[in-house]
Image (cartoon, helix red, strand yellow):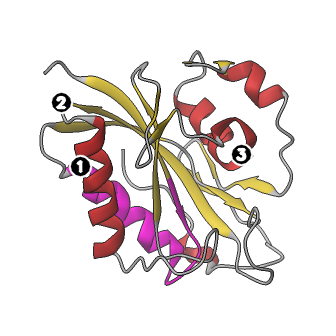
Amino acid sequence: MPSVRTYIGIGSNLNNPANQVRQAFQALTELPASRLTACSPWYRTAPVGGPAGQPDYLNAVAALETELTADALLAMLQAIEIAQGRVRTERWGPRTLDLDLLLYGLVTCDDPQLTLPHPRLHQRAFVLYPLYDIAPELTIPRLGPLTILLKNCPPLSITRLDIENEPVTIMPSNPFSLKSFSNPPP
């Protein structure tokens, strides 16, 4: 099977989110028949939907070249989530790790287990901003150019935590440990 460019959304708001995201990037480098090709800067974002009172999220996007099928990749992403303590109890609730298969090449599908592109990708600043950082010329199947999607999606509560791969000091209203905010090595 030829290699396919995929994009993975990464998010965490429990159990040391910076560590969870770092470990997720590392786990992506260890997937079989796959190669991590880009890691976005990290963003702190307010929760979207879900129960009130949950902590802010740490979000990023990874680009991956893979020979795995979309279903096999999804299964491996879910295994990484479980290995990092993910328990699915509440829709859009707090989580140790969330790995979303955002795009799998130009594939579109609406299966019960997998929808591509990710069904809410175009509504989520916490996905669009980091995706733009690593793929500004991207056109999303069924949705159009990423630049247009980004213009139509208000940033809401989102703070970029990395400028040129250097940590940024911020004073979040819902703080994580500030020393934890830095990008993984390239």
Residues shaded magenta:
10-29
In the image: residue 112, left or right of residue 174: left
- Disc 3 marks a residue whose amino acid type is Arg
How much space separates mark 3 and mark 2, taking CA atoms?
27 Å
| Position of residue 134 measured from the top left corner of the image (x, y, whole percent) | 52, 31
How much space separates mark 3 and mark 1, taking CA atoms?
25 Å
**Viewer-proximal residue among 184 and 115:** 115
- Disc 2 marks a residue whose amino acid type is Glu
Packing grade of label 1 (10 A; few <14, some 14-19, many >=20) is: some
Helix, strand, or loop for circle 3? loop
- Disc 1 marks a residue whose amino acid type is Thr
Q: Which mark is residue 67?
A: 2
> Is most of the magenta stretch helix, strand or loop?
helix
Q: Which mark is residue 29?
A: 1
Q: Which residue is mark 3?
A: 124
Pair 3/1: label in front: 3
Packing grade of label 2 (10 A; few <14, some 14-19, many >=20) is: some
| 18 part of magenta stretch | yes
Pair 2/1: label in front: 2
| Position of residue 132 measured from the top left corner of the image (x, y, whole percent) | 62, 30
Q: Is residue 87 above or below residue 130?
A: below
Helix, strand, or loop for circle 2? loop
Mark closer to the chain start, 3 or 1: 1
| Position of residue 76 measured from the top left corner of the image (x, y, whole percent) | 25, 55
In the image: residue 108, left or right of residue 83: right
In the image: residue 2, left or right of residue 79: left
| 76 part of magenta stretch | no
Mark closer to the chain start, 2 or 1: 1
The quarter in which the N terminus is drawn is top left
Q: Quadrant of residue 144?
A: top right
Q: Which mark is residue 165?
A: none
